[in-house]
Amino acid sequence: MGPATEDRDGLVLSGHMDVVPAEEPGWRSHPFTLTETDGRYVGRGAADMKGFLALAANRFRAMDPASLRRPLALLFTYDEEVGTLGARRFGETARSAAALPRHVVVGEPTELRVVRAHKGMIRLRLGFTGRAAHSGYPHLGKSAIEPAARAIVALAALREEMEAQRPAHGELFPSVPFVALNVGTVAGGSAANVIPDRCEAHLGIRVMPGMTVEDVAARVRAAVAAAVPEPFTLDPVSESPAMMLDAAAPIYRMACELVGQRETHTVMYASDAGWLARAGFDCVLFGPGSIEVAHQPNEYMPVHEFHRGGALLDELIRRRCGAA
Ligand SMILES: [Zn+2]
């Protein structure tokens, strides 16, 4: 919408359309029927992040294109929750990316704080292979679980080592100023009387801006190899890059000015902004609702915050796109 400009001025409003499953017990209303109670809109995705999508789509709908001097665009993505797949694909394939405005608001729920940095998330799969056998004849088999267990102990030590370190940009994340490693799942074996031939662990690692999958995988590989003589596989499953925007970036300064924010806010979760930043966009996270109610039963968006978010977006659009 609106004329393209050489300097890619204008504004993009971006959000993911997928939500996490709503199978938790404890929902007091149907998770997929938006319900208004006690000043809250309740439903799966109310905060993360269909509320923002509704605001963005309705800003667009109410807009008179003739009033825009610079472009306003919507960028809605898929499969953010399973590893920012849609944003990654957009960044890697969309030839139109270079035609879009450079300045992006990703409307993740930040309680209307302007966030210019977040950590990244790297998922790795660690695999051990043994030889299955009847457990009454142990000399015929080889356990895959035993070396996996030693590897997990080594990864716990690596976790502690990393918690004591303060890598570059750690100061942006004062509550967790280190790389956080989590052994999230372990699966192996089929029955108590069978020697297990396969064991697999999934690791999730929250990294600082600038850290690559290769850096992280190399540390994990070294820690496991030092503790376990058996061969193993280590494969990347997905990557959501960290994001860090310069404090002088126009979109950051304008959004901070709009809400009167002077201090720096950052978050520990990854978002589409990591891939969009790699594709050359200037991104801030800025949206109504709280991440603390996301992925929980009775997820909600405060009604007053929703409307305030809409008014702030109107003003941001007016300033960035020159709507009359
Ligand atoms: Zn989200």
Image: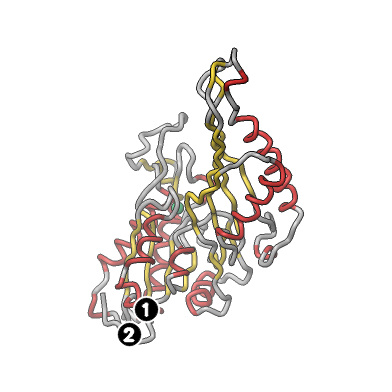
Label 1: which secondary element? loop
Residue 202 location in percent, x, y? 54, 41
Instruction: Determine the residue positioned at 59% across, 51% down.
Output: 205
Instruction: Determine the residue positioned at 31% across, 66% down.
Output: 59
Check whether the beta carbons of the residues at disc 1 and disc 2 lie within 8 A of each other: yes
- In the rendered image, which quarter is residue 67 located in? bottom left
For this view, does 55 lie left or right of residue 282?
left
Residue 321 location in percent, x, y? 35, 79
Observer-nearest residue: 48 or 229? 229
Observer-nearest residue: 79 or 103? 79
Foreground mark, 1 or 2? 2
Looking at the image, which residue sits at the far top? 136
Residue 204 location in percent, x, y? 57, 47
Q: Which residue is mark 1?
A: 10
Bin the neighbour count of mark 2 within 10 Å (Cα to Cα): few under 14, some 14-19, many 20 and up.
Answer: some
Q: Is residue 71 above or below residue 93?
A: below
Residue 33 location in percent, x, y? 32, 39
Q: Which residue is mark 2?
A: 5
Q: Quadrant of the C terminus?
A: bottom left
Q: Is residue 273 visible?
A: yes
Q: Quadrant of the N terminus?
A: bottom left
Q: Is residue 159 visible?
A: no
Q: Could you tell me the amino acid type at mark 1?
A: Gly
Q: Is residue 111 above or below residue 225?
A: below
Q: Could you tell me the amino acid type at mark 2?
A: Thr
